[in-house]
Each structure stands twice: as structure tokens, then as C-alpha cells.
Amino acid sequence: MTTTLQYAIREALNGVKDPEIDSVSILDLGMVETMDAEATEHGYLVRVTLLPTFLGCPALEIIKKNTESALQVIPNVEQVDVQFRFDPPWTSDRITEQGMQGLKEFGIAPPRFEQGKWEIDCPYCGSTYVTMENLFGPTACRSILYCKSCKNPFEAMKPVSTLM
């Protein structure tokens, strides 16, 4: 795979956003496990393997189709193969710093799991003076919390770890 093609693939994947969190790409969420390209007779076959953030996530098919669409417009890409893989499992440690910032900008507290404890800071004011209102948020990967400092409700992404 050429450096130019590798760059184009990364840029295309960076443009694929989580359908429910449009400020964070699948790259920054750490969903991209592998990406490669193989020369074919008339161009390239691009293969991408994604790790789902949660089993049963209803957005997986949308993410797959958006990934395929983004890769198919790259010059000389003839075929695209996007697959989901469940091993290794995705963990919240895979989220990049840019992804964490994107979650905050969207009003979602990024997951922090330290020393066996789920630490949550308000994405609006940074306070740790928060309470859990409901473990079950609008999606399987988020919970609803309330900041007692700035008085704002917010969502927090649940931490996922292989050590939990």
C-alpha cells in the first residue's frame, strides 16, 4: 500500500462519524482495528476491520455503510471490504485524546476508569461533584448524570475494560 493511499484511507475513515455522536470519528473512538489495501487488476481492494463499541449497537450497520461509502470514493479503489470483529474486544482505552475532546464538546463525559473506580467529570464545568441519575441512558453505551456544581444534566460514556 502506498503512503498516499494509506493517507487517503485514514482521511476517509476520519470522516466517518459515530451516527449518534457526530463530533467523533470511528478512528478517534478506536473502532478501527486494521486497514490494508491489496493491488487488483484495475486498482485496489481496501479491507477495514472494525471493533464495535458495544455488542448489539443499533448503529453498526450504519457505520459499516458509511465506512464503505467513504472508502469507495478514494481514487483507484475498486473494491471495499468492511468487517466487524469482536476479538479483541473494544475497550474505552482505545479512544484517542481527540476523541475524548470530541465527546466533551458533544456534552458527553468521556470514560475514565482508574483503580477500579469509574471517575466522571462534568463535560461542561469539569466538576467531579456529579450524581448518577440513571445507569441506562439513551443508548447502551451511555448513562445519565447530573452536575451539582453547574446544575446541568449530561451523559457519560460507560467505561468498557477487559479488566472489569
Image: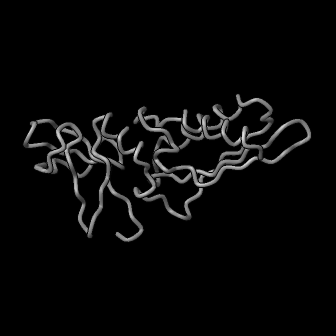
Name the image quarter holding the C terminus: bottom left
Q: Is residue 115 above or below residue 121?
A: below
131 left or right of 117 in image = left
What is the total number of numbered labels drawn onto the structure image? 0
Q: Is residue 2 left or right of residue 131?
A: right
Residue 85 coordinates in the image, percent (x, y) = 59, 57
Front-most of 15 and 7?
A: 7
| Vertical comparison of 132 with 65: above or below | below
Residue drawn at 35 percent across, 41 percent down: 101
Query: Can you name the residue that lies furthest to the right here?
Result: 41
Q: Residue at x 22, y 57 (%)?
A: 119
Residue 6 rendering spot, x and y as whole percentages: 69, 43
Image coords of residue 125 (percent x, y): 17, 39
Which residue: 77% across, 47% down? 1
Q: Quadrant of residue 41?
A: top right
At horizontal 44% and vertical 49% (from top left) the residue drawn is 96
Q: Is residue 43 left or right of residue 139?
A: right
Query: In this rendering, would 69 be left or right of 134?
Result: right
**Which residue sits furthest front?**
3
Q: How is the image coloured?
A: one colour
Where is 51 relative to 14, above or below?
Answer: below
Q: Please tell me which residue lies in front, 144 or 124.
A: 124
The image shows residue 69 at horizontal and vertical percentages of 65, 31
Q: Is residue 83 above or below residue 101?
A: below
